[in-house]
Amino acid sequence: MSIIDRLLNIDSRIIYLLLFLALAFPILYPVVLPMEVQQYSLTAFEFVDDIPDGSYVLFDGGNTAATYPQGGPGMIVNIVHLLRKNCKVVIFSTSVECVPFNQQAIDDALEKLSSDVSAENGVNWVNLGYIGGGGESAVAAFVNDIRSVLEADYFGTPINDLPIMEGVNDASDFAAVMWWGGSQGSIPWGIRQIVEPFGVPMTGQCTTNEVPNYSPYISSGQLQGLIGGVRGSAEYEYLLNLPGPALGQAMATNFGGLLWMIAVVLGNAFYLIKRARGEE
Amino acid sequence: MNAEILGLLVGSIVSIGAYSVLIGDNPISRVTEHLYTGILAGYILTTNWDYINRNAVSRLSQGNFIYIIPIILSLMLLGRLTPKYIWIFRYPIALTVGAGLGLAIRTTVVADLLGQIKATILPLNSINNIVMIIGTLTAIAYFLWSTKYEGTYAQVNKVGRFFLLIAFGVTYGQTVSFRFELVIGRLVAMLDPRIAIYTYIFIAVAAIILAIGYRTGKIPWYTGR
């Protein structure tokens, strides 16, 4: 068997091992590569920046155990950004698994805030927890009448006892929506149930693989920019001048991508060589 | 040891177990899978129970009798557990699917169709706009299967296919990047300086267990590529 045949038949476990090493290396030995902020992230950041100070902002948190490491850092700085603008942040989730991660993001955001920023639970922010009912139907019910689907927030405090929820009944009471959808594929729910019926502008976050799916919504103006995966989180950290874990993770992604590209190029080159030789 | 370190350690052990499936199916990976499934099922059950309790049962006990309907519908779902009563479970499912579909369709025409058409009506004053218009039209034309594949249409079809292939390539690249990010998320936690040494020890222990298993033939060696 020739070297080319051996390489084309390489055990996939060797590729996995190389990939693990390529991804772990920049984590163990941080390397900083140049990074340009993408237009989608910039638009999303500017959208948040332009929200009038003190506005009510509806926040869907959809990151799970798998996607929180990439979406979480961006979500944290997004909350910091909103609270610094004295916005009232109302957080909810339509997935059970996401609820503790939303609280984790809030707690981490509070740690990053300086003492002069008001960030009181129930006054400046509230975690409404889980909205049952299944996906888009739950969103529709929630945004049309919040109290019809919720009695209390994540900590069990009745909604009517929360100062932040005073006079807030449906989506029309919010100035903007942040849809941190993770890999749920839920951004269209927000567009269909909030942006179109209520006319409330929305920006979002999703995992890297979902970015192409939502590009048409950005072109049509239904989505104000998009934070895509760990790179989007890293760019948000950079734009808000709050460096965090996402920047380091984005560098590791570069190394993995480089190895993958080399593998794809070599695989195709070997295949073409074999074909040129008239081999199968 | 605080809760955060304990969480990182448990996460490290479980991640090593889950990733060991890459070597081939083995008892360590299976234990991890079962652990994850069991914990998640329990968590979902308790959270939903709490949600129903807070938002339906408590309201019912306060005299809001309308909430008896969702409670009955929820109970009807349990019909799924026995083949004899499976028909009962179909009614709440039909209602959920129907309501979900109706709610989605309500604004789908505006959100997913008219909005996208509007976004494609662009002035031909930049390369981006020209590419967007040609790409959209030719990609749609690719799916006109009622037209015979010849002449000008064949050329349009080829251009449409070209754009579709580029879109698939972008999606593939983004998917690969997403998978890396999933792994990186775990690696960052596993290689946290506070627990990295334990991660190395866990890897060594898992490797020894697997090596003994493969050596003695108790774990079958996966021979596929």
Image: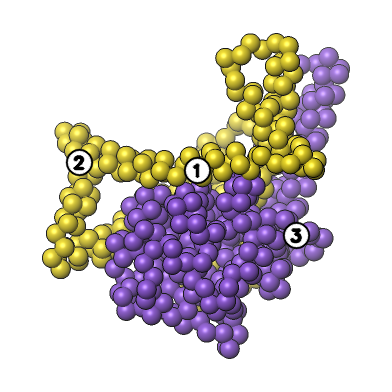
Chain colours: A purple, B yellow
Q: Which sits earlier in the primary sequence, circle 1 or circle 2? A: 2
Residue type marked 1: Val
Q: What kind of element bears circle 2?
A: helix
Residue type marked 3: Val
Residue type marked 2: Gly
Q: Find residue A240 and report its horizontal and vertical position in percent.
A: 68, 71
Badge 1 crowding class, 10 Å Cα cut-off, few under 14, some 14 to 19, many 20 or more, is some
Q: Mark 2 lies on which chain?
A: B
Can you tell which quarter of the image residue B105 is in?
A: top left
Q: Find residue B173 and report its horizontal and vertical position in percent.
A: 69, 42
- Between B225 and B180, the one nearer to me in the picture: B180
Determine which of the numbered discs, if any, sits on residue A150 in the image.
Answer: none
Confirm whether residue A93 shows in the render.
Answer: yes
What residue is at 31 percent from the left and 61 percent from the top?
A149
What residue is at 74 percent from the left and 18 percent from the top?
B155
Q: In this view, does A276 lie to the left or right of B102?
A: right
As drawn, A115 above or below B40: below
Give the residue number, with chain letter if any, for mark 3. Answer: A37
Q: What kind of element bears circle 3?
A: loop
Give the residue number, with chain letter if any, for mark 2. Answer: B79
Quote the CA–CA distance across marks 3 and 2.
Answer: 53 Å
Give the residue number, with chain letter if any, for mark 1. Answer: B110
